[in-house]
Each structure stands twice: as structure tokens, then as C-alpha cells.
Amino acid sequence: MKLVSVVVPCYNEEEVLPMFYDEITKVTDGMTAKWPELTFEFLFINDGSKDKTLEIFRSLADKDKRVRYISFSRNFGKESGMYAGLSNAKGDYVVVMDADLQHPPEFLPEMYSYVSSGEYDCATTRRTSREGESKVRSWFAMKFYKIMNKISQTEIVDGAQDFRFMTRQMVDAILQMSEYNRFSKGIFSWVGFRVKYMPYKNVERPAGTTSWSFWGLFRYSLEGIMAFSTAPLALAILFGILGCAASLILYICAIISACNYGDGAGTLAIIGTILLVGGLDMICTGVLGQYLGKTYMESKHRPIYIASETDETYRSKKQGA
């Protein structure tokens, strides 16, 4: 028998969870009928939800022994949710997907056929359209992938999703990268292995609203750049060189101006030079501060997540009561 662990990070998903459970069980029941050697477990991660997500997990665990869950003590973010799921998944294969049904469960049989053939270690989806997204958000997303692939040695495929069907070997490789500041899209690419990309068009959420704001996505993109590229450091050096060159030009202009028009013009030019150099110094210091901050957070060795409840502790309390 081969166990498939389906890891589902959730944050305030009470409206869509019942629909997701119905869809995922329908698809997995069909897969077990086609491949009798398969069994499934559903590992839900409650990332500090403020709605009834945890209550739904409890009710699902009561009626379906395949359901497991981990509930965080607070909101740690999706990256921590995925890491917790991968760390606690018991399967020979592991699936990571969202509960909002924008990662269609009907892709799972095709994913399994690719991975089980031995030709691939991972099957994932790649969006070929961004229908439903604002033009501004889509533009920034495309620019992010272009910039990231130019400044980083780790190639990240444009439109690649976190929705993945992976072998245990690949999951174990991902878990070896236990850094606090995580960027899973980069980690998935960095570990390598043979990946099958399956194109699909963007799917709208059937219920609920996304927890990703534009500012949240912008911060997430910065995490990716800082985690997989040192190019901003080189950019800071380039700005410094340009600043020095500009300062030299301004000094020459100030001298010429002072000779022809008096000291006033030269004084203004010097002030402008000081402001220019000071501004560039602040940019360089800010970039260095970002990297120093990442190093500081890594040196703390803080846990990536803290669990306050699991399906096992919930069942134990129930039996004790």
C-alpha cells in the first residue's frame, strides 16, 4: 500500500472548507478505485484562523479517520503552514494544495500518473492565464518572475504554483532546508529533481475571500529576492559608484560656477552633492540592513511554527471526557 498525504494550509476558510472536503474526497475515492494500492490522509493546517475553521477540522476528524490537523497558536503565515504539513506528513507521496479550490483536485489523478511512472519526482500546475486578477497585480507578478530569474541562479517558472504532487525523496530534500525566512517557490526549484509542469487557466474561488493583499504579495516577493539572490548588494555598490561619479561632476560644475558667478552657486552645488551622497548612503545601508535582519532572525533559531492543538490531542481529550 502507498499512502498519499494531502497537505492543506488554511486561514479563515470556513466558507469553502465543506466544498473542498466534498471535492477532495470524491476525487481520492475515484483514485483508490482505479489504483487500489493507494490510501489517503488529509492533513489540514489551521494558521491561526479567526473564524470557525478549527471547528470544521474537529467535525471532519470526528467523521473521517483519514483527517488530521494541526492548529497553530497564532498566524505564522502560509510558508510556516506548508512546512508544518510537510514535516508531519506520513505519506510515500505528498500533495500541497490550497483549500479555496483554485488548485483543482481533479488534477490529482493525472499528477499521480506522472509521478508514479518514475519519470518525474514532482508534478505541478502552471497558470497560463491570470483571468480574475487585476491588471496591476498581474503586471507586477510577471515583472517579479522576470526580475527574479535575471538576478538569481535559481530559475523560478512564471506561473508555477504551490500545488504539487511530490515523492517522499523530494519532500525530505525540502525539509533539509529549515531556514526561518522561507520562500517555497524558490526552495522547490533549488532542490532540483524532475518536475512536470501542467498548464491550466486560473480558477476563481467559489466562496470566501483571499487573505493575500497587494502589500502582502509585495512583501512576499521581497522575501523571495532576499532569500535567493545577493544582487541587491551588487546594486548598492553600483549606486555608490554612480553617486561618486555624480559627485565628481557636481564638484567640477561647482568650481566652474564659482569662478564665473561667485561663491553662492558653488555652495549650492556642494549642498546638493552632500544630499546625493547621503541619500545613496541610506539606500546602501537599507539594503545591508535587510540582509543583516535576515541573518539576525536565522541566528535566533526560532521555531517555524507552534502548534496549540492537533487531531491526536483533540481525540485524546474526547476519549478522556
Image (cartoon, helix red, strand yellow):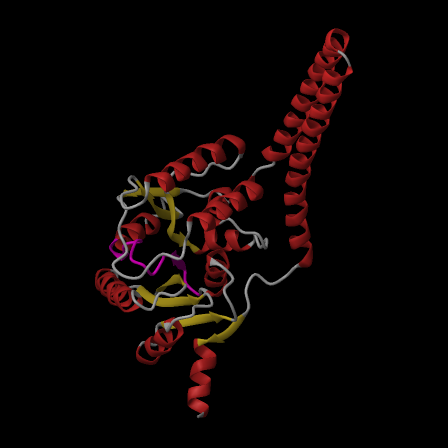
Apparent side of residue 225 relative to residue 162 in the rendered image (left or right) = right
Q: For the point 30% across and 42% down, which residue is it?
A: 130
Of all residues shown, which one is farthest toward the top?
260
Residue 100 falls within the magenta-colored stretch: yes
Quadrant (top left/top right/bottom left/bottom right) for the N terminus:
bottom left
Residue 73 falls within the magenta-colored stretch: no
Apparent side of residue 66 relative to residue 297 in the rendered image (left or right) = left
**Above or below: residue 301 compared with residue 215:** below
* Span colored in magenta: 90-106
**Above or below: residue 151 compared with residue 254:** below
Residue 17 x/y as whole percent: 31, 67
Mark yes or no: residue 36 visible. no
Q: Quadrant of residue 51?
A: bottom left
Quadrant (top left/top right/bottom left/bottom right) for the C terminus:
bottom left
Mark yes or no: residue 153 visible. yes
Q: Looking at the picture, tell me which residue is in the foreground, 315 or 236.
A: 236
Residue 91 x/y as whole percent: 41, 63
**Above or below: residue 138 compared with residue 266:** below
Of all residues shown, which one is farthest toward the bottom?
321
Magenta segment's dominant SS is loop
Residue 235 x/y as whole percent: 61, 30
- Total labels: the figure holds 0
Q: Looking at the picture, tell me which residue is in the foreground, 5 or 68.
A: 68
Q: Quadrant of residue 65?
A: bottom left
Q: Looking at the picture, tell me which residue is in the foreground, 319 or 81.
A: 81
Apparent side of residue 235 relative to residue 108 in the rendered image (left or right) = right
Q: For the point 67% across and 28% down, which residue is it?
A: 237
Q: For the point 37% across and 73% down, which residue is it?
A: 52
Residue 22 x/y as whole percent: 24, 67
